[in-house]
Image (tube, grey):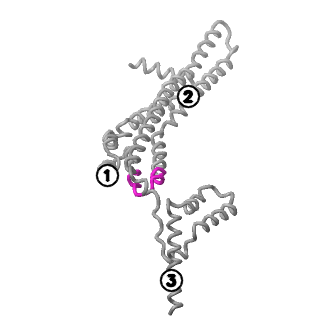
Amino acid sequence: MSEALNNLIGFFERGGLFMWPLLICSIFALTTIILRGFALREKNVMPLVVESEIERLMPGGSPDRLMRIVENDQSSLGRIVRVALQHLRSPRSENVEAVQTRARHEMVILEKGLIVLEVIVGIAPLLGLIGAVSGLVHVFSHLGLSSGASDTRQIALGIAEALNATVFGLSIAVPTLIAFSYFSKKVEVMSVEMETLVVELIAKCYFGRGAQDIPPPVRMTTRTQVLTPSPGSRALDHYCFAGRYPHHPSYLFRGLDHLQKGPAGSADQLTGIENGNESAGGAGACNRNGR
């Protein structure tokens, strides 16, 4: 045991100065691989109880039981599902946006540490190459200082020792590359599975609720009729606004488009209410004139 330890220490000493940065890289790589191996276990990212409850939920059913399950769940899927359930009172589009924002945050958490492996894969062979080149420079700098057959032997021994850094660098980069590829693929697969489950959950929760995403028509009174323009004037205002500010992004006009188009039948309702109010106003004027 002591002999093997001495050989290992001699291997590092003969490799030169760049063996120690490579040793630090190997420690970081090994630590990251162990931590990511525990963090990316499927039961920590996608608990089976949450998956089963999402699949058990009937379309249009109550998600109260699922909410109790994910209320204190700290897995990635649990946090995404909790956000989706908390925004069920919002329109479906707003709920999807909130879920996408949370999903991007969870992806950052899942990919944490993979950048360390990617960096080590790139720099470990380069550090080994630099160590080898520096060792060769040291060997050839002493070339010709000694005479005889021993000169050739010393050069060969020096070249062999200089290549120790290259061997060590490659031995670090290869397993680190394997671990990086494995974890990256695992994160990608789990993200697709979580996306499928969340899409299924939202579809079940909003089953039969398409009409709720459309805002109800405004109940018109005499006061709101004065303050609210007619559909034709709103279309004209939209045209003037778009012509006056042509460089504004398109999302600024979404509200105006919604007001212009409105829900189905809103224009007819508004016209009928306006005609009714005009008739009521005319009748009131006749009564006042009669008196």
Q: Position of residue 258 (x, y in %)?
A: 55, 60
Numbered range of the magenta stretch: 82-97
Q: How many marks?
A: 3
User: Type of residue at label 2?
Assistant: Ala
Q: Earlier in the sequence, mark 3 or mark 1?
A: 1
Label 3 vs label 1, nearer the camera: 3
Few, some or many C-alpha atoms within 10 Å of disc 1 (few <14, some 14-19, many ≥20)? few
User: Type of residue at label 3?
Assistant: Ala
User: Type of residue at label 1?
Assistant: Ser
Q: Quadrant of the N terminus?
A: top left
| SS assignment at label 2 | helix
Disc 3 target residue: 283
Q: Is residue 132 above or below residue 118?
A: above
Q: Is residue 229 above or below residue 258?
A: below
Q: Position of residue 231 (x, y in %)?
A: 58, 66
| SS assignment at label 1 | loop
| SS assignment at label 3 | helix
